[in-house]
């Protein structure tokens, strides 16, 4: 995906600042910048509970998007109930520990690059083929960014049972 993003950028286009492969991760919830002290045993226990409730799963990428507020160019997944459940359960576990996330993630995403902030829509992103197959999610980590890299403060394997099927709306007519 990163190579497709780079090659899709038109000559003379805005400066794209790609993230290094060691910086790629799917964001589930953003606690804050200087929040190392929040990685308490209680938080680790709460995240272990999340891991026991969500099964391993896979998702596919639907599209690239540009978020003008942050300047991020992100890969967004197709609808994946298990990935969304992981995102929501992570947020809930963090809040249960009395931590107010700096930014709640309502849509899991992978940040691949940055452009300048507050640019107009970037329609060239719509033409990029995002079909790279299924991406497996078998674990998640609590990451800390001390500057330019990510350090894992904890890692949990997903071992939960299959999620119940989503309820179906009965046909009215």
Image (tube, grey):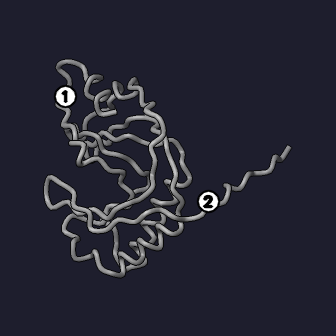
Quadrant of the image occupied by residue 98: bottom left
Q: Are marks 2 and 1 in contact (CB under 8 Å)?
A: no
Residue at the (17%, 31%) spot, across then down: 15
Residue hosting label 2: 162
- Vertical placement of 160 versus 111: above or below? below
Residue 125 position in % (x across, y down): 35, 28
Residue 173 position in % (x across, y down): 86, 43
Query: In what element is the residue under mark 1?
Result: loop
Residue at the (48%, 60%) spot, across then down: 86
- Vertical placement of 149 versus 115: above or below? below
Mark 2 vs mark 1, foreground winner is 2
Label 2 CA crowd tier, 10 Å (few <14, some 14–19, many 20+): few
Residue at the (44%, 43%) spot, across then down: 135
Q: Is residue 166 left or right of residue 12?
A: right
Whole-Å distance between the Cαs marked 2 and 1?
Answer: 44 Å
Residue hosting label 1: 14
Which is more toward the observer, 84 or 100? 84
Total numbered labels placed on residues in the image: 2
Which is more toward the observer, 115 or 128? 128
Query: In what element is the residue under mark 2?
Result: loop
**Disc number placed over residue 53 in the picture, else none:** none
Label 1 CA crowd tier, 10 Å (few <14, some 14–19, many 20+): few
- Vertical placement of 38 versus 121: above or below? below
Residue at the (47%, 35%) spot, across then down: 133
Q: Earlier in the sequence, mark 2 or mark 1?
A: 1
Residue 11 position in % (x across, y down): 20, 18
């Amino acid at each position: 995906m990163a190579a497709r993003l780079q090659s899709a950028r038109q000559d003379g286009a805005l400066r794209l600042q790609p993230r290094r492969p060691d910086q790629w991760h799917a964001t589930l919830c953003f606690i804050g910048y200087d929040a190392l002290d929040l990685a308490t045993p209680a938080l680790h226990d709460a995240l272990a509970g999340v891991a026991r409730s969500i099964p391993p799963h896979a998702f596919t990428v639907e599209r690239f998007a540009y978020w003008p507020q942050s300047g991020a160019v992100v890969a967004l997944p197709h609808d994946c109930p298990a990935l969304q459940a992981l995102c929501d359960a992570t947020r809930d576990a963090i809040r249960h520990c009395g931590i107010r996330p700096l930014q709640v993630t309502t849509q899991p995403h992978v940040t691949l690059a940055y452009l300048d902030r507050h640019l107009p829509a970037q329609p060239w992103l719509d033409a990029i083929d995002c079909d790279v197959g299924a991406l497996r999610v078998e674990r998640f980590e609590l990451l800390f960014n001390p500057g330019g890299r990510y350090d894992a403060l904890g890692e949990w394997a997903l071992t939960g049972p299959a999620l119940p099927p989503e309820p179906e709306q009965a046909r009215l007519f």
